[in-house]
Amino acid sequence: MILELHDVCKSYYRGKNPVRVLNNVSLQVEQGEYIAIMGPSGSGKTTLMNLMGCLDVPTSGKYILDGQDIGKLDDNRLAEIRNRYVGFVFQDFRLLPRMTALDNVALPLLYAGVNLHERRERARKALTAVGLADRMRFLPSQLSGGQCQRVAIARAMVTKPRILLADEPTGALDTAAGEQIMDLFQKFADEGMTIITITHDPEVAARAHKTYLIRDGQLTGAPETPRRSTAKRSSEPEPHILPAEEPDTPPIKESAPEDAIIFPEVGESHMDALTRQFFASDGEGGQHEA
């Protein structure tokens, strides 16, 4: 079992009044499962993703990730867990606008302590795997929405995570680009990657092995939905996808540098607190080259 939630609750304060967003959520996910969590706006699905991605911790209940009780970890340990175990794909891509596609993809490896040559090589392979070998030196502003999302997927996969978390991954894309992204997810799932997709789109959810519903902070199983055919609709060759591998990063250390990473390229209005804590700290601050 890679992920377990046991009666997890999450509350935030509005003034002095607590507002419960998640209410006794329980979920178990096996390694290699592909699940979708559906729900309307305000249902708690993004809060649930933040908890599963170790961007937040439960108010009560237990979250066990690969045998570790996440609620007992400090911020530095949570950052290490995120960098080692979890790859994130967001609806709005979260790419740094002044960095090339190559350097955006290489960035998590910088904070994982990988040397320059290796992180550039791994980033090249990841971009090639999502069909962007000819766009490595392009800035996000020079790419289409579908291409930006593929860069984000390459960045999520470059550290060889155990889990891929996707929050509305096709929400900002047209139909054709969305189909390409879901085809990539299907490839990863077929190769054994654990994928959790947060979505309101039944077409996206239909690709998953299991679907859950969240409403008013409560998670329930959804009725079985026929899986969509994943056959290609054109003769265009499929991009070669890197096989999912077990992480080759060293075991997590008992301590981590205390400083939080502040990305130099983007102002606070473009990079919120969650994204600033997205990768593990190298403890040095300042501007880095990926």
Image (cartoon, rainbow, N blue to C red):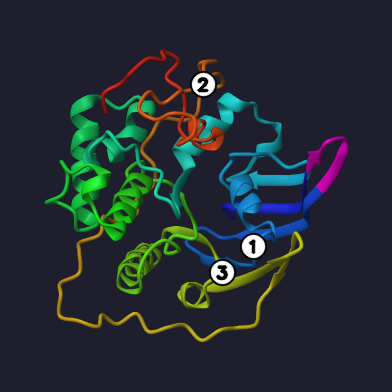
In this rendering, the answer to whether 203 lies above or below 247 is below
Sequence order check: which comes first, mark 1 or mark 3? 1
On-image quarter of the N terminus? bottom right
Residue shown at 33%/18% (left/top)? Answer: 287
On-image quarter of the C terminus? top left
In magenta, the rendered stretch is 12-19
Q: Which label sits in the foreground, 1 or 3?
A: 1
Q: CA distance from mark 1 to mark 3?
A: 8 Å
Mark 3–mark 2 contact, CB under 8 Å? no
* Residue density around tag 1, few if under 14, some if 14–19, many if 20 or more, within 10 Å: few
Q: CA distance from mark 2 to mark 1?
A: 31 Å
* Residue type of the residue flagged with mark 3: His
* Residue density around tag 2, few if under 14, some if 14–19, many if 20 or more, within 10 Å: some
Q: Which mark is residue 262?
A: none
| Residue position for label 3 | 200
Sequence order check: which comes first, mark 3 or mark 2? 3
| Residue position for label 1 | 41
Residue 189 position within the rendered picture, expressed as x and y whole percent measured from the top left: 40, 65
Residue shown at 35%/74% (left/top)? Answer: 175
Mark 1–mark 3 contact, CB under 8 Å? yes
Residue shown at 55%/18% (left/top)? Answer: 255
Q: Nearer the viewer, residue 256 or 12?
A: 12
* Residue density around tag 3, few if under 14, some if 14–19, many if 20 or more, within 10 Å: some
Whether residue 119 sits left or right of residue 26 in the image: it is: left
| Residue position for label 2 | 260
* Residue type of the residue flagged with mark 1: Ser
